[in-house]
Image (cartoon, rainbow, N blue to C red):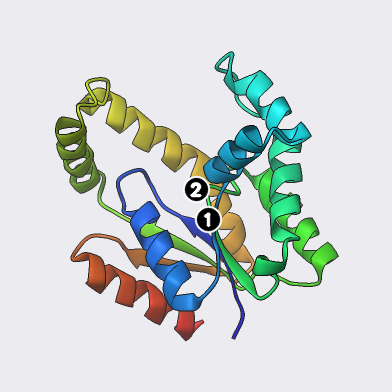
Amino acid sequence: MSARLVLLGPPGAGKGTQAARLAERLQVPAISTGDIFRANIKGGTELGRTVQEYTSRGALVPDSVTNAMVRDRLAQADAAEGFLLDGYPRNTAQVDELERILADLGHPLDRAVEITADPDVVTQRLLRRAELEGREDDTEDVIRHRLDVYAEQTAPISDVYAQRGLLVQVDGIGDVDEVTERLLAAIDAR
């Protein structure tokens, strides 16, 4: 079975932890747009220099640049049999672009997996993490705002994938191993 997946989930839902675990279990690369940005910047690529022009002044990287990086990354040999995308797509235009990229590569998306989590639980989780890691700017108001923004931006993406019959939702609250098993079961059940 191929495993071409998009992973969605609010801040604090354990998406990063689960992306790494799922990628290992499914034997596919976990591809994070943040990691792609950093690798291109570090490698001094043309795309990396373009990204740095935006990030150095605090601007958002335009979709056209992000899409080009994702297209390049998905064309690499290790992603031929599958991948897990984390942090992309972030809007419905990127959903459509991802579909074009995958059509060009001859590999359709298998599933969009959304890790769901109660906002109060993830707020408390993020507040604990902020305390442990000394993130003084991660106040409850800031965290709740980030969750609201995530919900506004992700709801349309989830809706698109649901309409295409690709969306599975999994409760992300609980023991890390239990959540991993829930995710794998949901992926296999589709």
Q: In the image as oriented, which residue stretches furthest toward the top?
A: 57
Indicate the quadrant where residue 28 lies: bottom right
Name the residue tied to disc 2: 155
Residue located 73% across and 27% down the image: 50
- Residue drawn at (74%, 72%) of the image: 107
* Dot label at residue 158: 1
Does residue 12 show up? yes
Q: Residue furthest right?
A: 104
Q: Position of residue 13 (x, y in %)?
A: 31, 52
Q: Residue at x 26, y 26 (%)?
A: 138
Report, in whole angstroms, how far the alpha carbon at label 1 lies from the one at label 2: 5 Å
Which amino acid, mark 1? Ser
Q: Taking 7 as reference, is 145 above or below it?
A: above
Of the residues shown, which amino acid type is indicated by label 2? Ala
User: Is the residue under label 2 in contact with that under label 1 (CB below 8 Å)?
Assistant: yes
Rendered image quadrant of residue 136: top left
108 left or right of 149 in image: right
Image location of residue 151, percent across then percent down: 43, 42
Q: Position of residue 183 (x, y in %)?
A: 38, 72
Is 84 or 115 nearer to us in this picture? 84
